[in-house]
Image (cartoon, grey):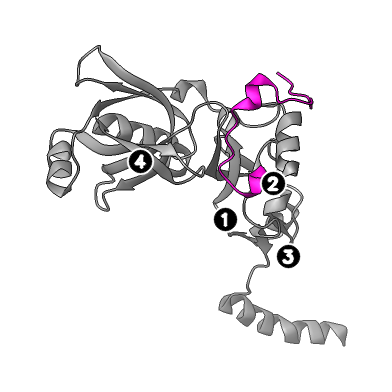
Amino acid sequence: MLLRRATALPKTLQNLRLFSPAATSDLALEHALETQLDYLPGFPRPDAKHAETILAVPRSDSGKNISAKERKAGRVPSIIFEQEDGQHGGNKRLVSVQTNQIRKLVTHLGYSFFLSRLFDVEVRSEIGSDEVIEKVRALPRSIHLHSGTDAPLNVTFIRAPPGTLLKVDIPLVFIGDDVSPGLKKGASLNTIKRTVKFLCPAEIIPPYIEVDLSLLDVGQKLVAGDLKVHPALKLIRPKDEPIVKIAGGRVSDQQKDQQKKDQPKKEQSKK
């Protein structure tokens, strides 16, 4: 649905909560009113095959011993936060989620991609029960993995109902490297950033952002302001922050030796 400017806020935006001082500016509000809060053609959207409901059960207490018991029982200690500023949580609900389910999602999606995707979290009275205490739309805010086994140790979620704005680190996916003039010349790709933080409406958080390298030559770079995103997304970092650069290849010692050997031959041929 296209949201047009009006004297009074339309109902769909009356409860829009802006959790960043910058987002409360007149410009941001005007932008929100004129933006189509839906995924646009040509921009990445979440793959439906990964749309999964995360099952959770209430957890009455926290602490090192409680967490250890939960992990031993095959569950991951988790917290569902209320929103305060789009990034940090306020009131919280202690829950535990299933280790196997979280491990599978992180493996299939990838670490950064898991943290940029919304999930339905269904809190049930106990494992195996059909009694649903609460069902919320939430964004994984952070996840800690075991350094040796990559097993999830804890997960933090933040509620993401429609009409809210969230600060999200969106993963970058690089395309066009096979036709980049600079890379074809043997230059190297210097990846400076792998994620970029945006303020996103909960309805249209992109799973990733494509970075097109197809026109980059040696010495050229792309900055955060060059990224093509939905107009409703607001870049949080400076626009001139570098993302990627095509760096000229260094001459190896072997190549230097070969050049020295070739030099006399070139001088002789000139004579």
Sequence-wise, the earlier of marks 3 and 4 is 4
Amino acid type shown at disc 4: Thr
Sequence-wise, the earlier of marks 3 and 1 is 1
Residue 11 visible? The answer is: yes
Residue wearing tag 4: 156
Q: Residue 185: percent from the left, percent from the top?
A: 71, 59
Q: Residue 46 colored magenta?
A: no
Amino acid type shown at disc 3: Gly
The residues bearing labels 2 and 4 have C-alpha atoms spaced at a distance of 28 Å
User: Label 4 neighbourhood size at 10 Å, few (<14), some (14-19), many (20+)?
Assistant: many
Please state the extent of the stretch shown in magenta in the rendering.
Answer: 1-24
Of circles 2 and 4, the one toward us is 4
Amino acid type shown at disc 2: Leu
Of circles 1 and 4, the one toward us is 4
> Dot 1 lies on which element?
loop
Which numbered tag is attached to residue 193? 1
Residue wearing tag 3: 219
| Quadrant of the rendered image containing residue 136 | top left
Above or below for 74 versus 243:
above
User: Residue at coordinates 68% horizontally, 60% vertically from top-left?
Assistant: 246
The residues bearing labels 3 and 4 have C-alpha atoms spaced at a distance of 40 Å
